[in-house]
Image (spheres, grey):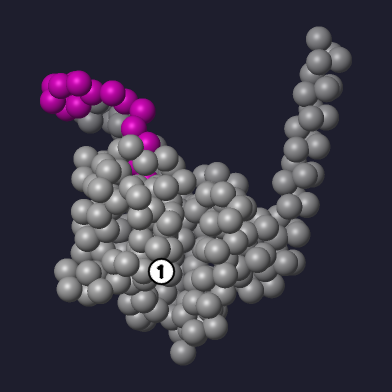
């Protein structure tokens, strides 16, 4: 049974380039036929299916559309064209500090973040001890989150997400954050998650993290799928392409330097 079905997803953003500070300036620009924006397609005809219990990674350079795709799966973004069907309870871990209020304590933020993920107060209270123990932050739960380090925020957010018992866990750029001990513990917990038949969808620049966690990977570039297949093979192809691009860039710089 499919957990995620993405059918010909297109996502358009508009980049403003005519700055109109008044209504008059905007009206005049419109009368002159000047558009105040450029169209930018972050995703172009992206289709894939993820089966229940599958762990899939999304790789690609900055600006390739990875986080946009994850936002659409999390239903915080709408595709311009196409459709996505997600079956099961989704828990997104999208960005550092998402769902946290910096002036509230860690304890208060657990209940706030969990409520945003659909957990009631009684359910969260029953899981609170496990959340704190996994995050290893028992001495800091009554301190404001704005006093937390980046690693502490990631640990707390990750711990909340995995204890919400979702059917589908969406993770954006957090696999490489935190010390080695916490990363090892997180990978072990994700392995348990997979064994329980849950679905993982991971976006990360940590290629080692992708191959450790995922069985399958999709390589996105400029909004298009380059390849979709075995995680080790896709990561190898992507890594080789990055090395080739860096070598080509270095050679071009060397030629320019010698010509000058």
- Quarter of the image for residue 89 reads bottom left
Quarter holding the C terminus is top right
Residue that protrudes farthest toward the bottom in the picture? 1
* Image quadrant where residue 159 sits: bottom left
Q: Can residue 171 be seen in this view?
A: yes
Which residues, given as a range, are shown in magenta?
9-27
Q: Does residue 101 belong to the magenta stretch? A: no
Residue shown at the point (80%, 37%) measured from the top left: 247
Classify 65 as above or below 213: above
Relative image position of residue 45 (x, y in whole percent): 49, 63
Q: Which residue is at 15% across, 21% downward?
A: 22
* 197 versus 223 height, above or below: below
Answer with left or right where residue 229 lies relative to residue 118: right
Residue in the foreground of this view, choosing between 85 and 3: 3
Give the residue number, with chain letter if any, for mark 1: 162
Say which element carries label 1: helix
Give the residue at x 70% y 60%. 235
Question: Which residue, as the protein is rendered here, is positioned at the far left?
Answer: 23
Relative height, residue 40 to residue 138 (above, below): above
Mark 1: give few (<14), some (14-19) or many (20+) Cα within 10 Å: some
Q: Where is residue 110 in the image (x, y as percent from the top left)?
A: 27, 58
Image check: 90 left or right of 44? Answer: left
Left or right: where 40 falls relative to 217:
left
How many marks are shown on the rendered structure? Answer: 1
Q: Where is residue 198 in the image (x, y as percent from the top left)?
A: 47, 80
Residue 25 lies in magenta, yes or no? yes
Of residues 101 and 182, the one drawn nearer to the viewer in this rendering:
182
Q: Picture coordinates of residue 204 (x, y %)?
A: 56, 55
């Amino acid at each position: 049974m499919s957990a995620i079905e993405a059918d010909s997803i297109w996502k358009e953003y508009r980049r403003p380039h005519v700055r109109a500070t008044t209504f008059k300036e905007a009206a005049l620009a419109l009368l002159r036929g000047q558009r105040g924006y450029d169209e930018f397609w972050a995703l172009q005809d992206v289709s894939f299916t993820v089966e229940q219990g599958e762990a899939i990674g999304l790789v690609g350079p900055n600006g390739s559309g990875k986080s946009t795709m994850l936002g659409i799966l999390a239903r915080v973004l709408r595709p311009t064209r196409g459709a996505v069907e997600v079956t099961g309870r989704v828990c997104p871990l999208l960005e550092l500090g998402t769902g946290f209020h910096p002036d509230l304590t860690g304890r208060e933020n657990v209940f706030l973040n969990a409520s945003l993920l659909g957990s009631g107060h009684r359910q969260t209270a029953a899981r609170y001890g496990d959340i704190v123990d996994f995050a290893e932050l028992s001495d800091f739960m009554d301190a404001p989150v704005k006093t937390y380090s980046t690693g502490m925020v990631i640990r707390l957010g990750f711990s909340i997400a995995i204890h919400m018992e979702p059917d589908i866990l969406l993770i954006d750029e957090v696999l490489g954050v935190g010390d080695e001990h916490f990363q090892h513990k997180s990978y072990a917990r994700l392995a348990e998650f997979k064994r329980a038949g849950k679905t993982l969808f991971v976006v990360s620049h940590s290629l080692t993290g992708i191959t450790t966690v995922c069985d399958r990977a999709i390589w996105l570039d400029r909004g298009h799928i380059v390849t979709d297949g075995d995680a080790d093979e896709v990561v190898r192809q992507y890594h080789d392409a990055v090395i080739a691009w860096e070598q080509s860039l270095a050679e071009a710089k060397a030629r320019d330097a010698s010509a000058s």
